[in-house]
Amino acid sequence: APDTMITDGRSLLPFLKGEEGQSREWIYVWYSRQGGETGQQFTRNQKYKLNLTGEFFDIENDPLEQSPLSEERLSEDQQQTRAMLQQALDQFADARPPEVSARGSRQQN
């Protein structure tokens, strides 16, 4: 496996058995519709989503992501959540193959 590969696999077995398991604080997504050359990259939890572009959304109250939250107006809890999601996003900065740039565009040779 390449040195840049990051894995955080967690067993779903406890949940399938009806037991308590270790839930995730966030998820990371790099998504390209139908395998296209550009994609989206973000981290999120159940309430908030942080795009690679820095846009931060309260997806519980704004599921269509129409109004990014203003960094100057974030509550203390929102600031802490944004920082956690940014740290998670930063972990995956080098996780993609070299031919795929950080913003999802394939580099031309």
Image: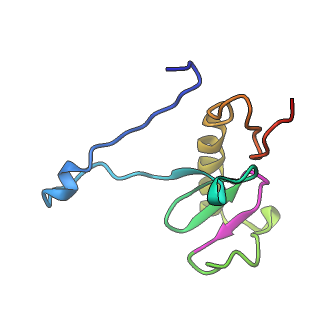
Return the x and y of residue 33 as percentages of the image width and height: 65, 60
Residue farthest right in this picture: 109
* Residue visible at 61% across and 78% down in the picture: 63
* Residue visible at 74% across and 46% down in the picture: 104
Q: Nearer the viewer, residue 46 or 29?
A: 29
Query: Is 53 colored magenta in this rendering?
Result: yes
* Residue visible at 59% across and 61% down in the picture: 77
Q: Nearer the viewer, residue 37 or 27?
A: 37
Picture quarter containing residue 90? top right
Return the x and y of residue 45 as percentages of the image width and height: 52, 60
Q: What range is drawn magenta here?
A: 52-59
Residue 6 sits above or below residue 50 on the image:
above
Magenta region, main secondary structure: loop
Return the x and y of residue 64 as percentages of the image width and height: 66, 79
Residue 74 sits above or below residue 84 on the image:
below
* Residue visible at 76% across and 76% down in the picture: 67
Picture quarter containing residue 58? bottom right
Query: Is 49 colored magenta in this rendering?
Result: no
Q: Nearer the viewer, residue 71 or 61?
A: 61
